[in-house]
Image (cartoon, rainbow, N blue to C red):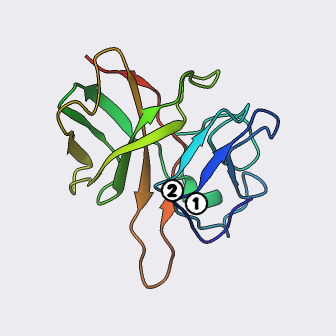
Amino acid sequence: MVGWGARAMVCDGVSIGWGVLIGSSAADSGTHTAVQSNLIEANGGLGIDLAPSAAVNCSSAPPGPNDNVQCPVIARATTTKVTGHACASCLAEIYLAAAAPDDQGHGEAAALLATTTAAANGTWTAALRPGQLSAGASVTATATSPASFQQAAESSEFSRNVTVT
């Protein structure tokens, strides 16, 4: 379990069962953890799990671990940009998805591709460098709410994988 931030870690292995577990239950509203710039893959479970539910929950409202920050939605992924929607002013981190999504179609992070901040209406666009992605690859993303004086930044679970066109 991770608390109060995890940055630039590599989490992998097939016998652990999860990558990063945040909170001890769905009612754990005291956990506020940002998981940023991490490579999380091949762990036999969810890459990021808000509470030990083993189910991606991208629609619950607070309270809950990380106030149930909703997963971003990737609208489109091309070889030059990725667009989507996340919480207003949240940091969207776009990753090359690991080889296989979890059983619910959500990804894990094999490589960080780009970061961008969502606008006030939640929309975001991340430009990619030429050659960074090939058509047919998959991408996934996380959203991290901005930190405030009263609360630490909080990250979502991974989004559904989207195939690059």
The part of the image, by quadrant, that contains residue 2 is bottom right
Helix, strand, or loop for circle 1?
helix
- Is residue 80 rendered to the left or right of residue 161? left
Residue 144 visible in the displayed image: yes
Q: Amino acid at mark 1?
A: Asn
User: Residue 98 in the image: x percent, y percent?
Assistant: 52, 29
Q: Earlier in the sequence, mark 2 or mark 1?
A: 1
x, y percentage for residue 115? Answer: 31, 52
The image quarter in which residue 32 lies: bottom right
Residue that extends furthest to the front in the rendered view of this protein = 131
The answer to whether the residues at label 2 and label 1 have Cβ atoms under 8 Å apart is: yes
Image location (x, y in percent) of residue 53? 74, 40
- Picture quarter with the N terminus: bottom right
Q: Residues within 10 Å of mark 2 (few under 14, many from 20)?
A: many
**Badge number at residue 155:** 2
**Can I make out residue 64 in this image?**
no
Residue 57 lies, with reference to residue 3, above or below; the image says above
Apparent side of residue 164 relative to residue 6 in the rendered image (left or right):
left
Q: Which residue is mark 1?
A: 66
Q: Residue at x 66, y 36 (%)?
A: 46
Above-or-below relation of 148 to 112: below
Q: Nearer the viewer, residue 102 or 109?
A: 109
Q: In the rendered structure, which amino acid carries the disc numbered 2?
A: Ser
Q: Nearer the viewer, residue 1 or 121?
A: 1
Q: Where's the C terminus, which quadrant?
A: top left
Q: CA distance from mark 2 to mark 1?
A: 7 Å
Can you say whether 73 is above or below 142 in the image?
above
Q: Quadrant of residue 19?
A: top right
44 over 144 or under it: above or below: above
The label nearer to you, 2 versus 1, is 2
